[in-house]
Image (cartoon, rainbow, N blue to C red):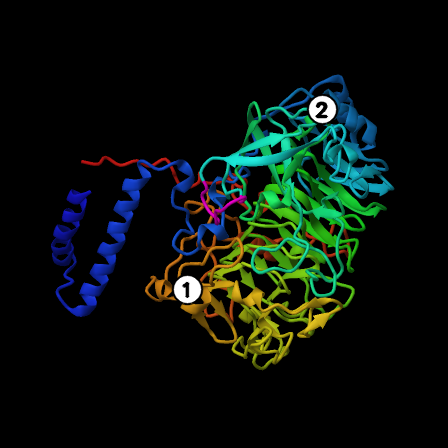
Amino acid sequence: MKKWLSRLRYNHVLISDKFGLGETPSAQAHLSNFLRLQAVALIALFFCAFAPAAVYAQAWSGILDPSRAIDWRNNPAMNFTIPSGNWSKCVTTACNAVTSSGTGVTAAQINAAIASAPANTYVSLGSGVFNLSSCISWAGHSNVVLRGNGPTNTIIKFSGGGCGGYSGNTMIQMQAASNTYDQSAANLPGGSNSLTITGTAGTAIGGPTGPGLYPQGATQITVSGVGSDTPKVGTLLMIDQANDTALAPGWLQCSVTTAGSACSENGNNGGRKINGVNYEQVQAVRLTAINGSTYTISPGLYANNMRSSQHPGAWWNFSSGLCTQCGIENLTLDYYAASVTSGLNIYDCYQCWLKNLRVLSGGGRSDIVLVQSNTIIIRDSYFFQTAGSSSGGGYVTDVVETSDALIENNIYDQVDNPLMFENGSGFIIAYNFSHNNIFTNPNWVIDVFPSHDSGSMMNLYEGNNFTQISQDTQHGPSPVITYFRNKIAGNQPVPNPKTEFTTPIELQANQRGMNFIGNVLGISTCAGGTFNGLPADKNSQCVGGALTGPSVQAAYENSPGVSSASCPNAIYMLGWPTASCVGSSGNLLSDPGTASTLMRWGNYDTVTGAVRWNANEAAPAATNYINANFSSSYFSSLAHGLPASFYYGGKPTWWNGTHGTPPFPPIGPDVAGGDLGGVGGHAYANLARLCFENTPLDALNYVGLAALSFDSGSCYGTNSGTSTAPTPTGLSALVN
């Protein structure tokens, strides 16, 4: 180590000479900074040689305290590659019957084919329109994919009431042969499918530590009271703990509505319910080893607040049943004539996927419901319209007690909410595009709900082009979600502008510990021409004018004790109990803790017209179960640079498109010359948006409907669906 540091002093002369920096104060300041970073890198490399894998530097290291993030690079969905590209066609008698029946095939025949298919094969549906009046079901038959000839060639049109699913009927059951649910008697203490967690083993890698506190990152749990339906290696355990039952600072998972302690506006009944208390904070993990009462799990614990006082435990499906490596690819799912709650259930699934789908209308509540699952991939797909477009419905993906999913490179067109989280953890939602969201109030801006109930945590949103992020507290708050390099406009460009609730970011009361880094926020207006004064994000949209008008948003922040001016038309709307700047809604009160625990760094916004590297905004103080995020003095001297991604080690191999390939990353304070206007050149259209803008309408199958003739093969390169390996973590160094 001494030799390395001595070499750095020698390098001071070598680098000055080589680059002609000379001895000017400015040059020497740059050089000193360079050498300081080199020293830090070498010292880090030295310690990495002897450190456990869990402590290797993350892409967010030095920007976020570890209590505010997890290792998204090694998320189980990132370490899973969809395997079906190498699978062979199923040729059993039942599978051949599907082929020979053509478009006259029935759902029963498809189900028989799935049940008969050998492992690692696909059931093939040919070209044509398939009219099905009953549901398709995997019934736990694993390692089988249902594959069409492309979304414009293979179209399944569903009708009827479907079959039983999670919280209502569905048309597709991608799920285990039988399913338990959180409040089943078997999952309660003393039941056949439950256990109590009495402690943890292993080294903490993130959050605070203390008596009775189970550390973030723990990969071993000690258990007691294991039910008779004993879990085994490979079981998905749903780890949970009791909700908080009163207001408190910091990390809060709570849904009570009691006056003086209300955490939510309307309460909730999610998760297990034990002694009258809900257990909504759930992480789905895989059991990888059993040694007596010590269970090894993967990944480790995400939460900072797991503690003995909240009686943590776990539960699992009957007989540990799962649908493993089940998938649907290359077809259209049309639910316009179906009368179901959700179009598709992914329920007790592990390593399951949806890829290159076109999904139309969906169920009365959601297109897809993800329940009690882990390692799910939804990518390269197009979702058009949702059957429900009101409170309590209209969701494309409804997330319930699911962890570690990758939702990437999808298009959401004329839908209410692309994503609605009841409770999910470890998700990566990235490089998606949402357009022309539809709500019952046609003037109201609406888009993504990263938190609608208590229980979500440690999710990452990166590179998306969304209209709005709304973490509401209708059923309870969720802590610590990260937003990195997204473009979030707060309104829709002409010809579909809105006039109400035009804020890009809404974090309601008790939503604590959020991170906003490198985002581009807000939308500007046209000056002159047909759309004078209306929002746009491309100069071409301003017919007869130019995209040089002022910001749609009129204030930087609305929050209690700061300002309510122009509410709700600010870049950030923080800590209010409802979608307006009022002090209370029922028993739920406004919350200054939403703003005081918020981390903001390197975001561009259209109100200030600049990138904000504000050290005070980047360094919230410590609070319950969330450490201080460094200090303002630390950020005052920190270089204004950001990594390209928080979950990729570099440009992913799938980042190429037939309609042009934008730079990677496409959004952020370090991006210049972007093709999206009114935001200082800091944003390019991502691949999903380029696909949307360059794909014609389907005038053959859906005349007059404005649905795209979508097929991912016409938009994205041949490597779509694969990704670069995460940044290496097993580095070592030779130390003399």
Residue 158 appearing in the image = yes
Circles 1 and 2: CB distance less than 8 Å? no
Amino acid carrying label 2: it is Ser
Name the dominant secondary structure of the magenta segment: loop
Label 2 SS: loop
Q: Nearer the viewer, residue 701 or 134?
A: 134
Tell me the number on the disc at residue 672. 1
Total numbered circles: 2
Q: Residue at x 12, y 53 (%)?
A: 14
Membership of 206 in magenta stretch: yes
| Quadrant holding the N terminus | top left
Give the residue number, with chain letter if any, for mark 2: 228
In the figure, is residue 377 to the left or right of 27?
Answer: right
Q: Nearer the viewer, residue 155 or 383?
A: 383
Say whether disc 1 or disc 2 marks the residue closer to the N-terminus.
2
Which of the two marks, 1 or 2, is nearer to us in this view? 2
